[in-house]
């Protein structure tokens, strides 16, 4: 039973709705496959998005990790869904705003990992700084460092702007997902299409798109 | 230095409440009061955290320019921790106990003596090494009320949250599907569905449920 009320403590409400983030990943995976890697939102127009890199599905303590250029296409991935596992994190390729970006989206927290910085080639996920036992030499501030500091600030603003843009895109996708998930079309149109897709059968992408657009147009 | 270089791996936290008018002075005083004090071998603490400069975890003098980047506060949470390997401590303690007993001409140690010897040995070993240091960056956008914390791990997030709340006197709520839905805003019908939402179960059961809904609509 996951019904929540205003009296339910915030921490509990957060925990009880973690699964919605996993369902967002499932929906992105589903749409990116049936729409052949082209998604869209009202604000952002159309853009490329598909699963790439690592897909992790789990249920309780059992997890399935699939790696590759198209992890969602592996038979094992959909078999895991049929066994009750849900996507916990998914590597995504995003072709948007004139650039290619890689990132990993976590379902439970909607946190990003390994998001390629603006203007940089796609890179692997990085660990936080661990300085080990020995401190590095103390950085000395000199007059010459002024330029370095300016560059550092410029880079910071650019990176934060990029992060905000990507968050905005996923925020819009999540809003569209919630409109579908919380509307009457979920049980009628979306869930049957996802179930058909999970079973490996053909989905009528045109009919799904029509129903989806109708539901999203109804919003607001 | 995840904030300034490399790929971006972070978790978001939302700050409730606006900063006070004199936030620069007030926050700076508070940050300086909680700047990292490096662990010393004779300290009681086994672990300690505090603020340091982004890009220089050993930079313990923070100026306005180090902290305020436009409408952002940037800081690094440094945590020092003593990590003496258990077997090393055990071996050294055994040697110290034997030497002590021999010196005193006794066969057994009291519980208090054992504890005191253990502390002495631990401090001696700490003097021969350095604490493990870890630094995680954060950027607080004062405009959006969002803190981007460059780690996904639970423990550093808990340490940061505690330090942040003590320093700035505001609450931090971690981003999640629930909080994002709240911020997006749900209409009445959506809020009702949200309240009673159950996880989707894939497989034949749900396909049947979808077909049943379709039949119901047709009839």
Image (tube, coloured by chain):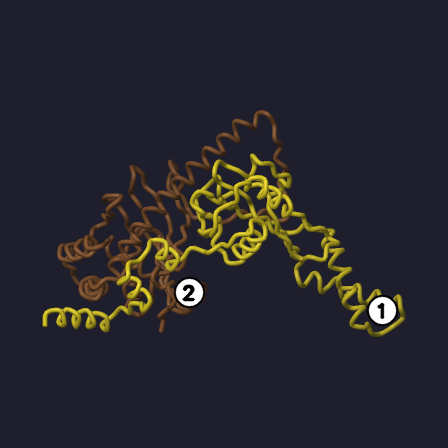
Chain colours: A brown, B yellow
Q: Could you tell me which quadrant the C terminus of chain B lies in?
A: bottom left
Residue sitting nearer the eye, A115 or A20: A20
- Give the chain of mark 1: B
Same chain for marks 1 and 2? no
Give me the disc on residue A15.
2
Q: The residue tagged with tag 1: helix, strand or loop?
A: helix
Figure check: B122 above or below B77:
below
Residue B59: quarter of image: top right
Residue sitting nearer the eye, B170 or A159: B170
Q: Visible in this render: residue A73?
A: no
Q: Visible in this render: residue B214?
A: yes
Residue sitting nearer the eye, B130 or B167: B167
Q: Residue at x 68, y 51 (%)?
A: B39
Instruction: Count neighbours of disc 2 (C-alpha within 10 A) and say few if under 14, some if 14 to 19, many if 20 or more.
Output: some
Q: Which residue is mark 1?
A: B101
Q: Residue at x 16, y 61 (%)?
A: A202
Image location of residue B196, percent across then percent down: 31, 69
Query: With A133 as the anchor, is A62 left or right in this view?
Result: left
Q: CA distance from mark 1 to mark 2?
A: 55 Å
Q: Residue at x 48, y 36 (%)?
A: B70
Figure check: B147 above or below A27:
above
Q: Residue furthest front?
A: B21
Instruction: Count neighbours of disc 1 (C-alpha within 10 A) and say few if under 14, some if 14 to 19, many if 20 or more.
Output: few
Query: With B158 as the anchor, is A205 left or right in this view?
Result: left
Q: Residue furthest top?
A: A143
């Amino acid at each position: 039973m996951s019904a929540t009320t205003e009296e339910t403590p915030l921490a509990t409400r957060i925990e009880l709705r973690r699964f919605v983030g996993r369902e967002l990943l499932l929906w992105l995976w589903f749409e990116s496959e049936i729409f052949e890697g082209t998604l869209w939102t009202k604000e952002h127009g159309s853009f490329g998005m598909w699963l790439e890199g690592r897909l992790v599905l789990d249920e309780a303590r059992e997890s399935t990790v699939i790696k590759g250029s198209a992890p969602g296409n592996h038979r094992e991935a959909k078999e895991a869904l049929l066994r009750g596992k849900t996507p916990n994190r998914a590597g995504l390729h995003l072709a948007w705003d004139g650039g290619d970006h890689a990132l990993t989206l976590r379902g439970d927290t909607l946190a990003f990992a390994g998001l390629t910085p603006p203007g940089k080639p796609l890179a692997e996920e990085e660990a936080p700084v661990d300085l080990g036992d020995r401190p590095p030499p103390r950085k000395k501030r000199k007059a010459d460092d002024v330029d370095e500091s300016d560059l550092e600030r410029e880079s910071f603003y650019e990176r934060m702007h990029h992060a905000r843009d990507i968050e905005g895109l996923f925020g819009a996708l999540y809003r569209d997902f919630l409109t579908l998930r919380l509307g009457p079309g979920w049980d009628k149109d979306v869930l049957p299409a996802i179930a058909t897709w999970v079973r490996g059968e053909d989905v009528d992408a045109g009919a799904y798109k029509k129903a989806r657009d109708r539901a999203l147009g109804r919003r607001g | 230095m995840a904030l300034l270089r490399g790929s971006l791996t972070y978790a978001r936290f939302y700050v409730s409440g606006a900063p006070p008018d004199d936030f620069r002075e007030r926050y700076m005083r508070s940050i300086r009061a909680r700047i990292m004090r490096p662990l010393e071998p004779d300290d009681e603490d086994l672990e300690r955290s505090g603020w340091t400069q982004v890009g220089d975890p050993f930079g313990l003098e923070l100026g306005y320019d180090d902290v305020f980047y436009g409408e952002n506060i940037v800081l690094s949470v440094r945590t020092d921790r003593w990590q003496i390997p258990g077997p090393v401590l055990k071996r050294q303690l055994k040697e110290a106990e034997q030497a002590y007993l021999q010196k005193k001409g006794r066969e057994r140690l009291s519980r208090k003596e054992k504890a005191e010897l253990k502390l002495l040995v631990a401090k001696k070993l700490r003097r021969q090494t350095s604490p493990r240091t870890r630094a995680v960056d954060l950027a607080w956008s004062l405009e959006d009320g969002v803190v981007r914390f460059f780690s996904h791990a639970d423990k550093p997030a808990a340490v940061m949250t505690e330090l942040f709340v003590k320093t700035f006197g505001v609450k931090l709520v971690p981003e999640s599907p629930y909080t994002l839905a709240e911020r997006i805003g749900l209409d009445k019908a959506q809020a009702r569905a949200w309240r009673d939402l159950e996880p989707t179960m894939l497989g034949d059961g749900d396909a049947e449920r979808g077909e049943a809904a379709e039949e119901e609509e047709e009839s």
